[in-house]
């Protein structure tokens, strides 16, 4: 956290010039179980739609958190979030760059559409703010690498929003695998939700109070329809449009499951060496990302990671070994069932324990310890989802160099690692 004047410093200064008595609430001094204002983490919330407001509420459930400001290109969303956080009009922003100028903000939550994650996070890094960023980390592997390197170079505390790591069942399942309880790990099978499709939709005027040009940001200019952004009673539409979510739901949702697979396989800071995938895409309409898919990733340790949509495998992650299997997402199952009663001994591998994802981030902002899902781990799990998207788009076998993050001798595939952004934005 940045060094800031404490309330005690303020009172000493005030006492030198003002003789009037001052009553300080006990909560501000950290009494009655509260945390002193000077010891709270000042938070700015960038992107406060459904997911962003949900995350904000999770943060504000911790006494160590202090909401400082909110930002959203939708006036209704930002005013509603400000009301929930009890913030005045001077703490509400349309443009994230203005929010990042505030010196009373220690950290930010980024919960915008995917195409904005990296550019906003890079601006936060330059402003010296710690970062909690929703998944997936990036929209391309190139921009993810740029962000990961910047975070590490500047010493920023970074937490990725793959919060399943903070569930006891997920950690225990991965510990069973890491400690050889299912024998030699041979295969991992992921079932993750499919994409969605829609038709063509009429253009409409941009709603009052919605900064559509800033919402588009680095994405190509496009005429407005709510079906490009959000319509009632369904997931945000941009999840299924490649301008905003390049690999669609493979990375947008599947990154949760890939992250679990990497944790259990002990490949958190590397990636596959080969992959091949096939997918079904919409034949028409606004949505253009993959619907159903099947992808196989081969790792240097000999493990094959099979990732499919849930029409082919149950939703979750199954680790298959020579002596059994364990399945997890939030729940856990295993064969033999006796695995569920196992105890991980003191001399065995114990994975990082976090009981609540936002709480873990707050603790690490104060201690400067690495969070449970740091930026390199986030980049590598996101990369696998993005690689899967490339595989199904190209529809052929690919070799991958996880150290240099390139497709060896395959320039057509390497062109898929980045894309041009709309001026004046740049990486």
Image (cartoon, helix red, strand yellow):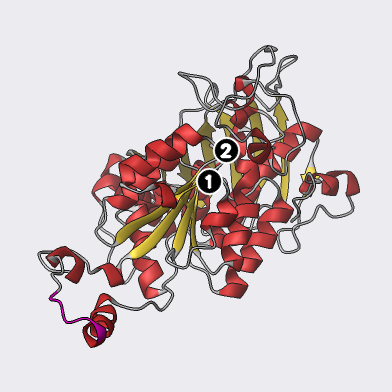
Residue 134 at least partly seen: yes
Q: Which residues lie in the magenta part?
A: 17-21
* Residue ID for mark 1: 135
Crowding at dot 1, Cα within 10 Å, few <14 / some 14-19 / many 20+, comes out as many
Instruction: Please name whichever residue, 82 or 264, is drawn nearer the observer in this view of the structure.
Output: 82
In 3D space, how far apart are the residues under numbered discs 1 and 2 (Cα atoms)? 7 Å
Residue 49 in the image, given as x and y percentages of width and height:
46, 36
Q: Which residue is mark 2?
A: 252
Q: Residue at x 73, y 48 (%)?
A: 274
Query: Which residue is pictured at 32% across the width and 41% down the height?
Result: 84
* 406 lies left or right of 204: right
- Give the x, y percent position of residue 211: 61, 36
Which percent across, then down, holds residue 369? 41, 72
Q: Nearer the viewer, residue 333 or 8?
A: 8
Element assignment for label 1: loop
| Vertical relation: 285 (above or below) 156 | above
The answer to whether mark 1 and mark 2 are in CB contact below 8 A is: yes
């Amino acid at each position: 956290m940045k060094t800031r004047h404490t309330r005690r410093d303020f009172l000493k200064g005030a006492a030198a010039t003002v003789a009037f008595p001052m009553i300080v609430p006990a909560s501000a001094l950290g009494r009655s179980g509260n945390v002193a204002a000077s010891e709270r983490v000042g938070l700015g919330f960038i992107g406060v739609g459904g997911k962003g407001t949900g995350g904000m509420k999770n943060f504000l459930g911790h006494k160590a958190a202090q909401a400082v400001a909110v930002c959203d290109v939708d006036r209704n969303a930002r005013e509603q979030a400000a009301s929930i956080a009890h913030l005045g009009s001077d703490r509400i922003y349309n443009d994230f760059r203005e929010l990042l100028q505030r010196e009373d903000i220690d950290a930010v939550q980024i919960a915008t559409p995917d195409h904005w994650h990296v550019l906003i996070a890079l601006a936060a890094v330059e402003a010296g703010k710690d970062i909690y960023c929703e998944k997936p980390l990036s929209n391309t592997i190139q921009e993810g690498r740029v962000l990961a390197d910047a975070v590490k170079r500047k010493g920023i505390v970074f937490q990725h929003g793959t919060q399943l790591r903070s569930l006891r069942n997920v950690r225990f399942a991965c510990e069973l695998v890491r400690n050889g309880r299912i024998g030699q790990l041979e295969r991992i099978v992921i079932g993750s939700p499919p994409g969605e499709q829609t038709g063509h939709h009429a253009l409409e005027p941009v709603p009052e109070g919605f900064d559509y040009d800033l919402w588009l940001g680095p994405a190509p200019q496009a005429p407005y329809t709510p079906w490009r952004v959000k319509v009632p009673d369904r997931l945000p539409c941009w999840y299924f449009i490649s301008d905003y979510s390049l690999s669609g739901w493979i990375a947008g949702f599947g990154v949760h499951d890939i992250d679990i697979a990497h944790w259990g396989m002990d490949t958190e800071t590397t990636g596959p060496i080969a992959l091949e995938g096939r997918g079904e895409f919409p034949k028409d309409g606004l949505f253009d990302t993959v619907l159903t898919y099947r992808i196989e990733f081969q790792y240097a340790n000999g493990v094959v990671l099979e990732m499919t949509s849930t029409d082919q495998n149950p939703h979750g992650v199954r680790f298959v070994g020579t002596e059994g299997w364990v399945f997890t997402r939030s729940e856990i199952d295993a064969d033999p069932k006796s695995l569920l009663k196992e105890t991980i001994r003191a001399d065995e591998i114990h994975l990082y324990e976090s009981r609540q994802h936002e709480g873990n981030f707050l603790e690490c902002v104060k201690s400067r310890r690495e969070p449970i899902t740091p930026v390199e781990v986030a980049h590598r799990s996101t990369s696998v989802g993005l690689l899967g998207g490339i595989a199904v788009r190209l529809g052929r076998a690919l070799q991958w160099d996880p150290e240099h993050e390139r497709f060896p001798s395959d320039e057509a595939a390497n062109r898929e690692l980045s894309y041009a952004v709309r001026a004046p934005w740049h990486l």
